């Protein structure tokens, strides 16, 4: 899979497998004066290059367009320790436990694939199943690894399909 990286003045504004975010970014830039932006660039990278890019980017290296709430959700995602989380878990992290649907909507609008790891959000039933399997697997040789669990759970929806989501989860958890 190829990923399209869009940068504005050297900061990453979007990483996607298509140009879905590009029109929104262009519309937001159009609202600024012509002098506000010096350079807009796009390039294609592989999934392995995306993983490497994800290791080096800091929050300050991103140029994100979204509401204050969306940015707070994206920041919480960005700061997550590698692992699988439910929307309820993420809603609690952003101190909005009643706003699970709003959090899910913000996650769905994430413009920076992998770097802001929305792929780590899976259905609550899957997180519960992982906890149950971990408890029963405590004494097995699989203890401490979540990778073996991925084929037994639903990873949920993803803009680029469940296979792409599963691939990104495996790459991130294999660290």
Image (cartoon, rainbow, N blue to C red):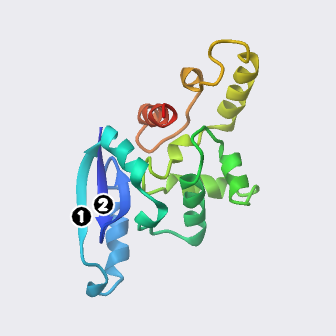
Please identify the quadrant where the N terminus is shown: top left
The tag earlier along the polypeptide, 2 or 1, is 2
Residue drawn at x 58%, y 43% as measured from the top left: 121
Residue drawn at x 71%, y 16% as measured from the top left: 137
> Looking at the picture, does residue 128 appear above or below residue 80?
above
Q: Are marks 2 and 1 in contact (CB under 8 Å)?
A: yes
Residue at disc 1, secondary structure: strand
Q: CA distance from mark 2 to mark 1?
A: 6 Å
Residue 166 image position (x, y, % from top left): 47, 32
Name the residue beneath numbered marker 2: 6
Q: Is residue 34 left or right of residue 114?
A: left
Residue at disc 2, secondary structure: strand
Residue 113 got which mark? none
Residue 41 image position (x, y, % from top left): 23, 64
Residue 173 image position (x, y, % from top left): 52, 34
> Looking at the picture, does residue 46 appear above or below residue 72?
above
Name the residue beneath numbered marker 1: 41
Residue drawn at x 31%, y 83% as measured from the top left: 36
Residue 139 image position (x, y, % from top left): 73, 13
Specify few, some or many for label 1: CA neighbours under 10 Å numbering under 14, 14-19, or 20 or more. few
Q: Is residue 118 left or right of residue 127?
A: left
> Looking at the picture, does residue 125 appear above or below residue 59?
above
Q: Which of 120/30 is in front?
A: 120
Residue drawn at x 66%, y 54% as measured from the top left: 101
């Amino acid at each position: 899979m190829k990923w399209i990286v869009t940068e504005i003045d050297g900061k990453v504004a979007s990483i996607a497998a298509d140009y879905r975010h590009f029109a929104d970014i262009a519309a937001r830039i159009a609202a600024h004066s012509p002098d506000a932006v010096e350079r807009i660039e796009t390039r294609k990278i592989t999934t392995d290059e995306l993983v490497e890019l994800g290791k080096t980017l800091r929050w300050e290296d991103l140029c994100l367009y979204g509401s204050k709430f969306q940015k707070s959700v994206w920041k919480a995602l960005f700061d997550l320790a590698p692992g699988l989380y439910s929307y309820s878990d993420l809603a609690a992290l952003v101190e909005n436990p009643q706003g699970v649907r709003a959090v899910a909507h913000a996650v769905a609008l994430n413009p920076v694939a992998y770097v802001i790891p929305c792929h780590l959000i899976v259905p609550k039933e899957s997180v519960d199943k992982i906890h149950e399997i971990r408890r029963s697997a405590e004494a097995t040789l699989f203890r401490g690894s979540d990778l073996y669990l991925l084929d037994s759970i639903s990873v949920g929806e993803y803009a680029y399909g469940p296979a792409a989501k599963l691939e990104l989860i495996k790459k991130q958890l294999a660290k």
